[in-house]
Amino acid sequence: MSDIGEREAALPLETRPAATRKVFVKTYGCQMNVYDSQRMSDALAADGYAATDAIEDADLVLLNTCHIREKAAEKVYSELGRIRKLKAERQQAGREMMIGVAGCVAQAEGQEIIRRSSAVDLVIGPQTYHRLPEVVRKAREGEKVVETDYAIEDKFEHLPQPRRAEVIKRGVTAFLTVQEGCDKFCTFCVVPYTRGSEVSRPVSQILAEAERLAEAGVREVTLLGQNVNAWHGEGPDGKPWGLGRLLHRLAEIPGFARLRYTTSHPRDMDDELISAHRDLDALMPYLHLPVQAGSDRILKAMNRRHTGADYLRLIERIRAARPDIAMSGDFIVGFPGETEADFEDTLAIVREVRYAQAFSFKYSPRPGTPGADMRDHIAEEIKDERLQRLQALLNKQQREFTESLVGKTMSTLIEKPGRHAGQRVGRSPWLQPVIVDEKAGGIGDVVTVRITGAGTNSLYAQAV
Ligand code: SAH
Ligand code: SF4
Ligand code: F3S
């Protein structure tokens, strides 16, 4: 789960003349929410709702929310305030605008959302998205619906498969959730409460969805899970499979040129997964492996169940298997009780690992988590100051990594047209956008390029 937090994505406009109503979906939070929004859209399409990217045209507005930090959760209420006005305007014109809240805030707050914002018509938690069409129908009949029970049935089995036309429109890269939920209970984190306990999707279901994506022209798949490397299942051979084995099987699907997975927990990096990084060309040399902090005392208080040294040893083994692997991570500064010396340990780990990319956050106490009740909360100014120092170091490492790619030859997956005529935008193995001439190749091609320059976020390249 990189890119957590403030990312928002409205789903693209879909033209379906047969559809009578329109839905606008806004997504907050992690990639799992992006995937879920697509699946909710797919489920609603089967019920006659076409997706729109113009909120004022929507008969149904769905906010797919994130609860990870206070700021993320509060954003939902300010957005609801704005939408409430649009709803009143539409109602005055004799049209409907149902408002739904989905995602992790829905799961965590349930009924409370309707109490705080009476314009909301339905609240639905991540475990019950397969019931969305039914929930919307009930809400349209005038009932305020709150659907946040953990469903016993498997939602994935009841959700429609991704639609071919939509997959094509979304491009040559796709997300595929293989695992949901978390049993790790880090003391700062709401995910085990909002997403429930760890569940792995069965191999057959994953393969069926993967084949469908491949048939629609997808070239790169990112497997998703809150703890994706905790995924396990039973293979068609009757043997227990881990993520490493699953990646080997997915690499056999014709059409898939690139595989990625995120987010991993250090405790679930097993030997098979590490050797997949050595043996599979399709598995991209990039790993998001959050450590959160460098001090063993703080790691213990966080219930991470690994030390700083465990993490460094693990990275050594991964780099031995795949020397060109780029590391990415998540960090929290100002966890309760964090001293200056503890924080220096975080900086020391960062210096040791050398990250290509990273996400860092100020600790945000979350209701219901053990961290919120701990003593010695850190003052906001100290958190600010530590975050600044950490980010200065991480930004420097990111720049150094990007600059180190100049002059190198590498594969690039061409993803979309560029902003300027005659250009295309591809993606390096290490996730940087790569700007190339359109003669380098068509969308969906994997081409070899030489990097000629580096900007702040992107690389410039020539085909070789
Ligand atoms: N499952 C993933 C991460 C899930 S949440 C993992 O275990 O690594 C994504 C990131 O948000 C976390 O890695 C953490 O850095 C950050 N985060 C989670 N809870 C937080 C909190 N209460 N305050 C600040 N950052 C938090
Ligand atoms: Fe949250 Fe920890 Fe689970 Fe990651 S492993 S989702 S940080 S509880
Ligand atoms: Fe946020 Fe839920 Fe993802 S809390 S980070 S949307 S799992």
Image (cartoon, helix red, strand yellow):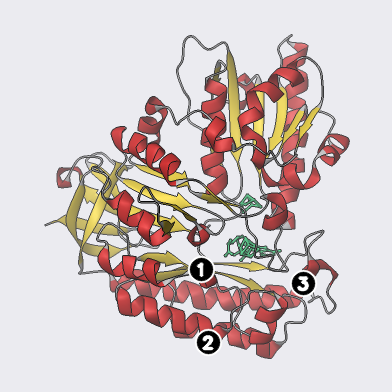
Q: Quadrant of the C terminus?
A: bottom left
Residue 451 percent across, percent down from the top left:
22, 63
Kind of residue indicated by mark 1: Asp
Name the residue located 33 percent from the left edge and 47 percent from the top edge.
Answer: 220
Snapshot quadrant of residue 98: top right
Seen in the picture, residue 195 relative to 112 is either above or below; the reply is below
User: Visible in this render: residue 283?
Assistant: yes
Q: Is residue 367 left or right of residue 195?
A: right
Q: How far apart are marks 3 and 1 (CA)?
A: 33 Å
Query: Which residue sits furthest left?
Result: 464
- In the picture of the structure, the residue carrying the numbered disc 1 is 268
Mark found first going from the N terminus, 3 or 1: 1
Toward the viewer: 15 or 278? 278
* Residue mark closest to the camera, 2 vs 1: 1
10 Å crowding of disc 2: few (<14), some (14-19), many (20+):
few
Q: Earlier in the sequence, mark 2 or mark 3?
A: 2
- Mark drawn on residue 21: none
What is the CA distance from the residue labelled 2 to the residue labelled 3? 29 Å
Residue type indicated by callout 2: Ala
Alpha-carbon distance for marks 2 and 1?
Answer: 16 Å
Queried on whether the Cβ of the residue with tag 1 lies below 8 angstroms from ligand 2, the answer reads no
- Name the spot of residue 230 as percent of width and height, x first: 52, 61
Task: Determine if residue 431 is in view.
Answer: no
Q: Nearer the viewer, residue 70 or 313?
A: 313
- The residue that appears at 76% across and 49% down in the rendered structure is 74
Q: Name the residue under label 2.
A: 309
Per the image, the residue denoted by label 3 is 380
Q: Type of residue at label 3?
A: Glu
Which of the pair 325/386 is nearer the observer? 325
**From the viewer's perspective, is residue 146 above or below residue 360?**
above
